[in-house]
Amino acid sequence: MEVVILCGGKGTRAYPFTEYFPKPMMPIGGTPILVHLMESYARRGWTRFVLAAGHRMEMLVDYFKGRFNDWHIDIVDTGADSDTGERIRRCAPYVGELFHATYGDGLGSVDLTSLVDYHKSHGGLATVTTVPLRSQYGTVVFDDTGRVTEFREKPIISDHWINAGFFVFSKQAFDHWDGQNLESEILPKLLAEKALYSFRHDGFWKSMDTSRDQSEFEKLLADGNAPWIIE
């Protein structure tokens, strides 16, 4: 199975880093988050990568030249301004009948083997990994009189689930690929056709959207608590 990784967006929230580099090149412990992500697949035996590039593609080409010779890496120019769904569609010639796809700026402790097994079991065309929504704010708990009883730091809202990436697609999904944006057009189309399934993940997941996220990743790694590294 190939692993398609979205690497071409401009990542405006991570400016000024993304003025010069693709966002997936933001480092954690001196290594791009993209490489941490690729290693998570490689540890499970998937080493054929298709990098859906666009913005500052040349930086990916330069970085991977002569590195990771045990991996097969195709860097595909999917356009500087293409949307997420269009980027994956342009990678169709590089994938087989079943392939992984994910965002290049998120890490998780997702059981990728179980994800694939689940996709094969349900007969649909696409599986998206979902995680419980974590509030970006701390919340205040109080009783009927208004007396504050507790502060909760960024609690998990367990009855709401969000898209964490870590997709598995059957190549037949391209026959139903209608639109440019993966999240607002293509996935809803697959949903309407009852061909989209959710693989629920309760463990670690985090995306790197800002320099603050980068600092949080760095701290996890420095503390020896990098939950995305599963041997």
Image (cartoon, rainbow, N blue to C red):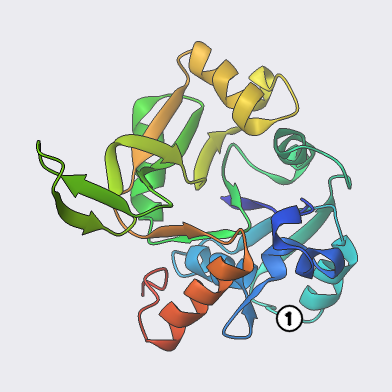
Is 220 situated left or right of 20 in this image? left
The residue nearer to you, when weighing 79 against 16, is 16
Is 30 situated left or right of 23 in this image? left
The residue nearer to you, when weighing 129 against 22, is 22
| Mark 1 nearby-residue class (10 Å; few <14, some 14–19, many ≥20) | few
* Residue at image location 79% in from the left, 68% down from the top: 16
* Residue at image location 58% in from the left, 62% down from the top: 208
Residue 9, position as x, y percentages in the image: 76, 50
How many marks can you see? 1
The residue nearer to you, when weighing 51 against 210, is 210
Indicate the quadrant where residue 160 lies: top left
Residue placed furthest toward the left: 144
123 in relation to 59, above or below: above
Residue 80, position as x, y percentages in the image: 89, 47
Circle 1 residue: 67
Is 167 situated left or right of 173 in this image? left
* Residue at image location 79% in from the left, 81% down from the top: 66
Residue 97 appears in the rendering: yes
Indicate the quadrant where residue 204 lies: bottom left
* Residue at image location 56% in from the left, 20% down from the top: 188
Is 28 situated left or right of 77 in this image? left
28 in relation to 101, above or below: below
Residue 162, position as x, y percentages in the image: 43, 39
Q: Secondary structure at mark 1?
A: loop
Residue 51 appears in the rendering: no
Query: Which amino acid lies under the numbered mark 1 shown in the image of this protein?
Result: Arg
160 in relation to 138, above or below: above
Residue 153, position as x, y percentages in the image: 30, 59
Viewport quadrant of the C terminus: bottom left
